[in-house]
Image (cartoon, helix red, strand yellow):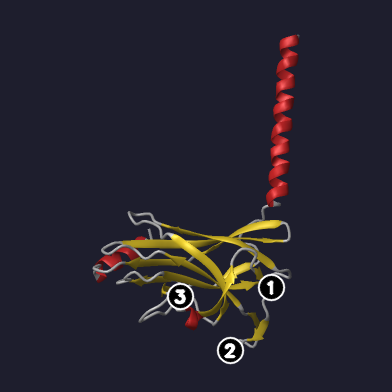
Amino acid sequence: MRLRFDRRLSFILAGIVVALLGIGAFLARGPIGLGNGPLFFESFSISGWRDAGRAPVGLIVPVINHGRSAAVINGITLVGGRNGYPAPQLTTAYGAHDAGCSAIGPLSGPGSDADTGRCATGHLALAGLTIPPSRKLLDRVTGKLVAVSSLGLVAEAEPPAPGRCWTVKAMAIHYRVGIRHYTATAEEAGAVCGSGVSSTELQAAIDSLGG
């Protein structure tokens, strides 16, 4: 009888510990939201770029908030690699005022389509960045009101080494609305190669994104 009681007590204590851990996680992180939540990220689709040199690579995505409450950004994760290609190394991330485009490319220098002066302006701290509900404008083609972005997210990555390429499949954006936390996925597929890489090798890196 004592052995059965000891086992029952152990199970009860283990259950209490698990419950307390669950409560602690809930208080620390809040409830987890389903899906991408109210934020939508415009895509630059599949892009490729070579002869990167040593300029940092920028991945810029405009953000649209379809919700009624402000969203607060917690962080960004670059998802990539696979098929023999490494993922890009994220060096920094920040918010910026959207100038109406999404892009992947050098943040400075000749041919910089991702230059923050063209796609986004300003440099806003990412941690705690607030994305307000997006304003709506009349679409001249459809005649309907559509949400437009006012803020963008910029992920800055290390360029690939000469003769090498890296690929990115998506950007995972971690944010919260109130106490509810979300991880939204922006399908931002791209391949960037360093100097000395041929067009054929770049195309192979791009093709790997489809598999």
Q: Identify residue for label 1.
A: 132
Q: Nearer the viewer, mark 3 or mark 2?
A: 3
Residue furthest to the bottom in view is: 140
Q: Earlier in the sequence, mark 3 or mark 2?
A: 3
Q: For this view, does 18 lie left or right of residue 79?
A: right
Residue 100, placed above or below residue 36: below
Residue at the spot 67% in from the left edge and 60% down from the top edge: 176
> Crowding near pointer 1: few (<14 within 10 Å), some, many (20+)?
some
Q: Are marks 3 and 2 in contact (CB under 8 Å)?
A: no
Q: Earlier in the sequence, mark 1 or mark 2?
A: 1
Residue at the spot 57% in from the left edge and 60% down from the top edge: 75
Residue at the spot 69% in from the left edge and 34% down from the top edge: 18
Q: Nearer the viewer, mark 1 or mark 2?
A: 1
Residue type indicated by callout 2: Val
Q: Identify residue for label 3.
A: 103
Q: Residues under labels 1 and 2: Cα distance?
A: 26 Å
Q: Identify residue for label 2.
A: 141
Pick the quarter of the image with the N terminus. top right
Residue at the spot 73% in from the left edge and 68% down from the top edge: 69
Label 2 element class: loop
Q: Residues under labels 3 and 2: Cα distance?
A: 24 Å
Q: For this view, does 194 lie left or right of residue 28?
A: left
Residue type indicated by callout 3: Ala
> Crowding near pointer 2: few (<14 within 10 Å), some, many (20+)?
few
Q: Identify the image quadrant of residue 164.
A: bottom left
Pick the quarter of the image with the C terminus. bottom left
Residue 110 position in % (x across, y down) = 35, 81
Residue type indicated by callout 1: Pro
